Amino acid sequence: MPRYIDAEALDKRVYEEIPLKYFNGSLKTMSFVRELIEEAPTISPDEVRGVGEWLNDVGEFGFPEIPCSVCGYKSGHNGFKYCPNCGARMKGDTNGTTD
């Protein structure tokens, strides 16, 4: 699983907190490290939490049970933009609207 970091905090630490002696006095090396941080790949929050949709379903006693397509959490309604259980962003709801 990927490890998520705060790139701005890491860049600040490289720039302000790491003494130049660790880079043998080379500003070029420190600049290179900062460049690597800046060019590091990024991901969207949807890649982390997932994207799902509310599915139509009827429960055991005839009441609506609208499960999340990502985790299966059953809600009595589909008004959530995010699943309260797994955090997946819902791309639509059972009323036919889309996000």
Image (cartoon, rainbow, N blue to C red):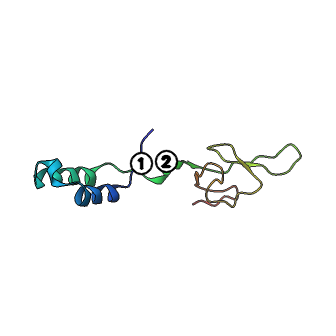
Name the amino acid, label 2.
Val
Query: Residue placed at 32% from the left, 48% from the top?
Result: 41
Residue 78, position as x, y percentages in the image: 70, 57
- The disc, 2 or 1, on the residue closer to the chain's N-terminal end is 1
The residue pinned by badge 2 equals 48
The quarter of the displayed image where residue 99 is located: bottom right
Residue 3 seen anywhere in this rendered image of the structure: yes
The residue pinned by badge 1 equals 4
**59 to the left or right of 7:** right
Query: Residue placed at 77% from the left, 54% from the top?
Result: 76
Residue 80, position as x, y percentages in the image: 66, 59
Q: Which one is in front, 76 or 6?
A: 6
**88 to the left or right of 32:** right
Determine the secondary structure under disc 1.
Answer: loop
**93 to the left or right of 21:** right
Mark 2 in CB contact with mark 1 (< 8 angstroms): yes
CA neighbours of label 2 inside 10 A, class few (<14), some (14 to 19), many (20+): few
Name the amino acid, label 1.
Tyr
Query: Residue placed at 26% from the left, 55% from the top?
Result: 38
Which quadrant does the N terminus fall into?
top left
Residue 60, position as x, y percentages in the image: 86, 42
